[in-house]
Amino acid sequence: MAIFTRATKAAVSPPSEAAKAAAAGSGRGGGGYGYNANNAGVNLVGQYYTYYEGDARNRAMSVPTLARARDLIASVLGATYLCMYNEIWNEIDGEMEKVYIAPRSWLKQPDPAIPYSTLMSWTLDDLFFYGRAFWFITSRTADGFPSSFTRLPAATVTTRDQAGPIWYAPSNQVYFQGGQINSDDLVQFISPIEGIVYQSEQAVATALRLEHARYRNATSTIPSGVLQVTGGEPLSAQELGDLAAAFNAARENNQTAALSENLKYEATSMSPSDMLLIDAANFQALEMCRLGNIPPYLAGINIGSYAYTTSKGAREDLYLFAARQYMDCVAQTLSMNNVLPRGTYIEFDIDDYLAEVIAETESPDVQEMPMTQPATTAPSEVMQ
């Protein structure tokens, strides 16, 4: 666990390279990035009214546990800055040693139009739901390497040489809003995990149907029942429907119901928790935690296996189990030779992210407090 106890600061100094706009221009949209017939997609870059995140992604985000998982992981990437380093061979230790260097100017704010945290959070959103993300290079420095970027929503990008949902490598036939974009002007992030909208469509659909059923049951303040006609003339289907509708409207607006001698109401034995499907909702929330790769207790689900957890341990678990794979994807992609010179690398300063919590937990004035309590009973299907 040395990674959580050693705080390593990235060397930060004024950028050494001179800023230089791309030869094609730096205007947003309107062909400002060097429009031509084979690069028509750049004409819509920066035209935000055409951007959208996708219906499948929006449906998944309507599941509270998935939304919580996405936001937790995004908070790690958005709050952890990048640092730059070279590697040299240490003959004494017999291993490569990192030598941190001054970062390039774009490292603190890759997109000049939005904050670093916003860009990283929405890049994570694309990786989380679609399994890939795209940055368009808006300008370059004198040495030809990128100096600024803008994100293209993954839902608006299609690739004709890869149908998905598994992405094997960066695409060479990329189309943004139907227009082709030169792949040399893109940074393509390929997630090591398949996107949520592809890998578990049935699980997400089940969660949505369960929420719909709970919403339907929640519209009634008292348990459902059967209204039985015990005498008089037989009623038609239309008359029975009108009678039931009138009774439902009356009981929703009054605490006391009145029935004639020919009517009898038999309420079901379902409790309010049964009507709201609490047990089913808790199990489905646990399924969504598995889908989002976050520890269940971070979504407020108690399965009894996390009896005593500190804020420091929660951050470590979130990083190790959920965020690290995406952070490695972003850092390693930005370390490739189309972004940085050979031999220069980028990583997230995760020690700096954890340093505040480490300092707090090591303070004598701070006591560890339990975040979850062990469950006395747990459904057998949850414990499996």
Image (spheres, rainbow, N blue to C red):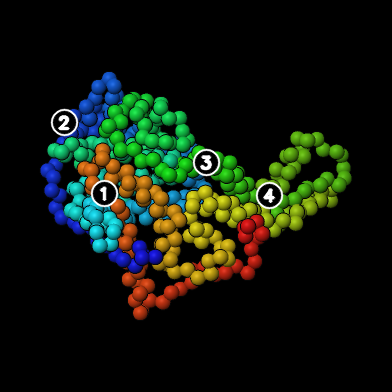
In the displayed structure, does residue 282 sit left or right of residue 106?
right
- Across the whole image, how many numbered discs are drawn on residues? 4
In this view, the residue in front, 30 or 316, is: 316
Q: CA distance from mark 4 to mark 2?
A: 73 Å
User: In what element is the residue under mark 3?
Assistant: helix
Say if 383 sits above or below 126 in the image.
Answer: below
Badge 4 is on which residue? Answer: 250
* Residue name at image x 36 percent, y 46 percent: 329
For badge 1, the amino acid type reads Tyr
Residue 314 pos. (x, y %): 44, 63
Residue 109 pos. (x, y %): 24, 48
Q: CA distance from mark 3 to mark 1?
A: 32 Å
Viewer-side label of 2, 1: 1
Viewer-side label of 3, 1: 1
Badge 3 is on which residue? Answer: 199
Badge 1 is on which residue? Answer: 345
Badge 2 is on which residue? Answer: 23
For badge 3, the amino acid type reads Gln
Is residue 312 in sight in this rendering?
Answer: yes
Give the mark nearer the N terminus: 3 vs 4. 3
Tell me if label 3 and label 2 are in contact, CB under 8 Å.
no
Give the mark nearer the N terminus: 4 vs 2. 2
Residue 295 pos. (x, y %): 50, 58
User: In what element is the residue under mark 1?
Assistant: strand
Q: CA distance from mark 3 to mark 4?
A: 46 Å
Residue 276 pos. (x, y %): 63, 54
For badge 4, the amino acid type reads Ala
Give the mark nearer the N terminus: 3 vs 1. 3
Give the mark nearer the N terminus: 4 vs 1. 4
